[in-house]
Amino acid sequence: MRAAVILPDLLLFSRIEGAAGSASILRVDTPAELPATASFDLLLVDWSAREPGWEVVLHERRAQGSRVILFGPHTDVDAHRAAAAVRLGPMWARSKLLSSLPTLFGDALRGATPAR
């Protein structure tokens, strides 16, 4: 499995990386930093750190076969609305993401497609 995480928070990334097991995982600060030709099975995005134009790159990655999951603070109502407005939602709360990591990486490592 290949995963990418768009996340400036290194502490949170270390928790994600710990759950990734043997999966190949890449951390970047913005979608523009993703390798141009790389295909990822899973793309986790800190939507609270979003900037204008991110949705274009994320839609392209989704069209290329990446599963895109947006996450952020459950209290960030604007971020939840923005995710829905650009048709990339629903945005997950960070707590849901963290509790789902074993399943996300476990299913992928076993070759199964996790439920969307």
Image (spheres, rainbow, N blue to C red):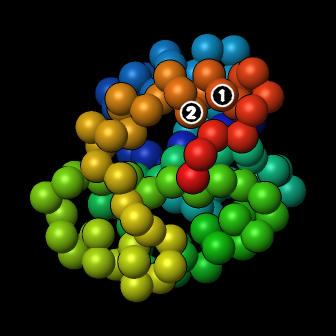
Residue located farthest toward the bottom when viewing the structure as drawn: 85
Residue 44 appears in the figure: yes
- Which sits in the foreground, 6 or 70? 70
Q: Which residue in the structure is indicated by mark 1?
A: 107
Q: Does dot 1 land on a helix, a strand or a loop?
A: helix
- Tell me where residue 34 sits by quadrant: bottom right
User: At which x and y percent is residue 20?
Assistant: 58, 22
Picture quarter with the N terminus? top right
Q: How far apart are marks 2 and 1 (CA)?
A: 6 Å
**Which residue has dot 2 on it?**
104
Q: Who's the residue at 44% across and 68% down the image?
A: 89
Give the image location of residue 28, x and y in percent. 55, 46
Mark 1 residue crowding within 10 angstroms, few (<14) / some (14–19) / many (20+): some
The answer to whether one can see residue 10 in this image is no
Up the image or down, 27 lies above or below 73; here it is: above
Q: Which amino acid does label 1 sit on?
A: Asp
**Residue at 27% across, 37% down:** 95
Q: Which residue occupies 13% across, 58% down?
A: 75
Q: Look at the picture and state if 42 lies above or below 53.
A: above
From what the image shows, is residue 47 above or below residue 28?
Answer: below
Question: Is disc 2 in contact with disc 1, using a CB cutoff of under 8 Å?
Answer: yes
